[in-house]
Amino acid sequence: METVIVVHGGAGAWDMASNRFAEALVACTTAAAAGQAVLLQGGSALEAVETAVRLLEDAPALDAGRGSYLNAVGDIEMDALIMDGRTLDLGAVGAVRCIQNPITLARRVMTDSEHAFLVGPGAEAFAESVGIPRCKLADLLAGEELAAYEALRQRSDYQTAEIFTQPGAMGDTVGAVAVDQAGNLAAATSTGGTRKKLPGRVGDSPLPGCGGYADNWTGAVSATGHGEALLRVMISKRVCDFIAGGLSAQRACEAALQVLEERVNGVGGLIAIDTRGRIGAAYNTTAMPHAFARGEQPVETAH
């Protein structure tokens, strides 16, 4: 089967004329190319999405890993999910601190533990037990995030959903979906959450069926947006259900986004691949930088 990979850098109120948006597109292009290389070398879809998301986590212009938002007490807590469409195995972590690449920790939860989801200090202790190093909070801070945190501390009326409408704000969450030469699907999603969230808050990103989902019978999906809205409609599983009902990946993303808007007045975006290798991407924010690659064809970007 022809390989396909799609990655996104988060739906949000991006300033498309800014350097940050340009950096986001470059990060998506680099991540898609790295995932494509894995697939063309015979690697699995699972390997490809982990590889791609690690690079997105390392990009300071994006809200995952390095570049994550600070929460209400000036800390960084991250969430991640990875899912294998062949077996429906998954690994997820929530509210983890000082881990450079939460997506790799999520995969180790899947492969090296009897569990599927670990959170907080327990997830951090597991990371140490499997040799994943801790980093410093300063290693995850990027750009003007500390200054933004200091400004928001003075605002008692701030709502976390503002990040999706505030002009010039960057996106929320990164992710990847892929299909490999064997026709197996995989999905991965990683996030630094949203600005000034309460400590311990976990959004949609690490929840299977919400922040992402992969099933060889239907498709692979990664979601981005206002987590409290996305999880209420289980948006990623909904995309897969629409595909099961006969829609293409593109139409399924559009239909799920319509449900998000009509049922909970939510904002966000989606990328998907169906079992035929067709790509879907939809969002209702200002932009969602994303990139994709089919087979040996050059990486293409969109927003």
Image (cartoon, rainbow, N blue to C red):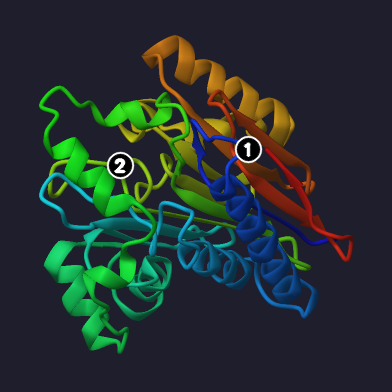
Q: Residue at x 46, y 63 (%)?
A: 57
Front residue of 115 and 33: 33
Side (left or right) of 259 relative to 97: right
Residue 86 falls in which quadrant of the image? Answer: bottom right
Camera-near label (1 vs 2) is: 1
Q: Is residue 98 visible?
A: no
Q: Tell me if mark 2 has few (under 14), some (14-19) or many (20+) residues whose alpha carbon lies within 10 angstroms of its own.
A: many
Residue 55 sits in which quadrant?
A: bottom right
Which image quadrant: the N terminus?
bottom right
Q: Secondary structure at mark 1?
A: loop
Q: Amino acid at mark 1?
A: Ala
Q: Of callouts 1 and 2, which one flags the residue occurring earlier in the amino acid sequence?
A: 1
Q: Is residue 123 left or right of residue 255?
A: left
Q: Is residue 110 left or right of residue 8?
A: left
Residue 293 position within the rendered picture, expressed as x and y whole percent measured from the top left: 78, 57
Q: Give the residue at the far top of this rendering.
A: 262
Q: Badges 1 and 2: C-beta atoms under 8 Å apart?
A: no
Q: CA distance from mark 1 to mark 2?
A: 23 Å
Name the residue tied to disc 1. Answer: 17
Q: Is residue 129 above or below residue 43?
A: below
Residue type at mark 2 is Thr
Residue, far right: 297
Which sits in the foreground, 295 or 21? 21
Q: Quadrant of the C terminus?
A: top right
Where residue 191 appears, as percent x and y from the top left, is 38, 52
Q: Residue at x 63, y 64 (%)?
A: 31
Indicate the position of residue 283 as horizontal and vertical percent values: 58, 28
